Image: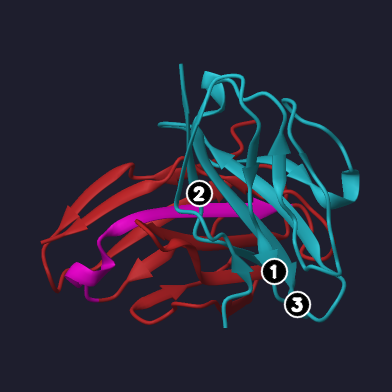
Chain colours: A cyan, B red
Amino acid sequence: AQRVTQPEKLLSVFKGAPVELKCNYSYSGSPELFWYVQYSRQRLQLLLRHISRESIKGFTADLNKGETSFHLKKPFAQEEDSAMYYCALIWGSNYKLTFGKGTLLTVNP
Amino acid sequence: NAGVTQTPKFQVLKTGQSMTLQCAQDMNHEYMSWYRQDPGMGLRLIHYSVGAGITDQGEVPNGYNVSRSTTEDFPLRLLSAAPSQTSVYFCASRIKWTGNTEAFFGQGTRLTVV
């Protein structure tokens, strides 16, 4: 069963518009959730994690246990935000890191 | 620190050939793992290791072997390459296998099996 669901494969917005990348998870324990980003021709890197409750590059994500969601938001998208975004979950006794299928964000000028 | 280093960056294999993808990290991380990245499938866990001498299977382990004789190295072996193994492979490491820890990734190996 898929533990992390990202319903949008592709998301296209205009510069300056708000953006929300959706992520839902399935895990009965206490979730440890992350957003990773892969810019073109670069390696995956951590964007933010729920436990830190931080804002990185203007992005925030709030854990909603009732809706089992961890959506990524930014009020004003920039062209440099264009990238592949992965939601990820650490789960199980061996703390496996599982990724969603990813959302390709394109910010148009 | 170099971080996580993968070699080679690109490889073309013929069906049935074997090869080893190398992964090394210089951060003294306990946890290492291999993923494959395919269009529309995201990253899928192949094998992982929580420390030297300890390995376990992920979601898609068939056709791959791993070993962890040292903390630094975690090679991935393709026993008999198949076209279905054409993919981009990523190695990742985390400082500890428990808890909320950041994963650091290599730059990837693009493998084509013909």
Separation of marks 2 and 1 at Cα, in angstroms = 15 Å
Numbered label attached to residue A25 = 1
B60 displayed left or right of B105: left
Parent chain of label 3:
A
Classify residue B48 by image quadrant: bottom right
Residue B22 at x, y percent in the picture: 42, 53
Q: Are marks 3 and 1 in contact (CB under 8 Å)?
A: yes
Separation of marks 3 and 1 at Cα, in angstroms = 6 Å
Crowd rating for badge 3 (residues with CA inside 10 Å; few <14, some 14–19, many 20+): some
Residue at the (37%, 57%) spot, across then down: B21
Helix, strand or loop status at disc 2: strand
A92 displayed left or right of B42: right
In the foreground, B79 or A50: A50
Q: Are marks 2 and 3 in contact (CB under 8 Å)?
A: no
Where is B64 relative to A13, above or below? below
Classify residue B84 by image quadrant: bottom left
Separation of marks 2 and 3 at Cα, in angstroms = 21 Å
A63 displayed left or right of A43: right
Classify residue A4 by image quadrant: bottom right
Residue A47 at x, y percent in the picture: 69, 38
The residues colored magenta run B80-94
In the foreground, B52 or A37: A37
Q: Amino acid at mark 2?
A: Thr
Parent chain of label 2:
A
Residue B3 at x, y percent in the picture: 61, 38
Residue A36 at x, y percent in the picture: 63, 45
Specify which label sits upstream in the sequence, 2 or 1: 1
B21 drawn magenta: no
Numbered label attached to residue A103 = 2
Residue at the (89%, 44%) spot, across then down: A52
Numbered label attached to residue A27 = 3
